[in-house]
Structure formats: C-alpha cells, structure tokens
Image (cartoon, grey):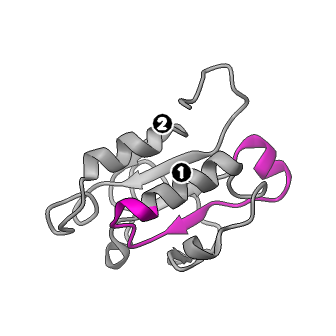
Amino acid sequence: MPVRPTDPLPCRVTVCRDCCCGSPKVTGVDHAAQITRLGEEAPVRVSECLDVCDQANVIVVQPSAAGRAAGGRPVWLGLVNDPDATEDIVAWVRAGGPGVAPLPDILDLYAFSPRGSASAEPSPGGS
C-alpha cells in the first residue's frame, strides 16, 4: 500500500546512493527497483555518501512519529544487496518499524552502528 499524504508521519527510509552504494561496484542489484519497492511502503530519501562504504548498500530506517515517541531510533542496515533483504525491510516498515515493531532476527544480521554514534541520523548531504 503506497504511503498517503494524510498518514501520520510514517517510518522514513534513507537510501545511500553515491560512490559505492547504488553503483555498478555493487553488482547483481537492481538499485532503481530497490528504491521503488521501498517507496511503495514509506517515503524514501536518496542520500549522498553516508561514509560507510564498506557496508554498501546502506539503508537507514527512521522511526515513525509513534515509533519515536516509543523510543525508537534510526536503524542502519548494511549489505542490503538482494531482493529478499529489501522485502524484509518492507515488511518491518509495514509492521511499524523502529519503536513499534521489534527488529526481525533476519534484519539483525544487516544492522550495524555507523561511525560515531549508534543513533546517528543520516544527513541528506552525507557525513
């Protein structure tokens, strides 16, 4: 179900697309289809380099308003390089995401802490 403008602030997804993420360096991934699929469930922001190139492709799931009120923090996911992982993220976001739904065990395998802070917010201009 696509996000409707009248929905309360839903989870947001930031997708790194710069020097490594979203590039031919990460082979076998339909990068455009990944963004399109994530955008069917949540607003997606494409970011410049998030400075964790060793984790390409990087996706950050930010909590909804309800999730943030419940203590949810952004969850950084790395090495998201196959459609199954993208579908696992979509399902988690649909369930409520950070602060609302527990991180599925399968996504725990992709979770990492960015340099500097475990709760760092991605910035649209990079690091």
In the rendered structure, the answer to whether residue 10 lies left or right of residue 77 reads right
Q: Quadrant of the N terminus?
A: top right
Tell me which segment is drawn in magenta.
Answer: 64-85
Residue, x 45% and y 38% (percent of image)? 39
Residue 49: x percent and y percent? 33, 60
Residue positioned 47% across, 56% down in the render: 87
Res. 56 image quadrant = bottom left
Q: Is mark 2 on a helix, strand or loop?
A: loop
Give residue 106's position: percent from left, percent from top.
Answer: 56, 74
Amino acid tagged 2? Glu
Query: Can residue 127 be seen by looking at this rendering?
Result: no
Q: Are circles 2 and 1 on residues that touch, CB within 8 Å?
A: yes
- What amino acid type should be assigned to the residue bearing mark 1? Val
Q: Is residue 99 left or right of residue 22?
A: right
Q: Callout 1: helix, strand or loop?
A: helix
Q: In this view, does 5 lie to the left or right of 14?
A: right
Q: Can you say whether 122 is above or below 20 in the image?
A: above
Q: Distance between the residues labelled 2 and 1?
A: 8 Å
Task: State the residue position of label 1.
Answer: 90
User: Which numbered dot is residue 40?
Assistant: 2
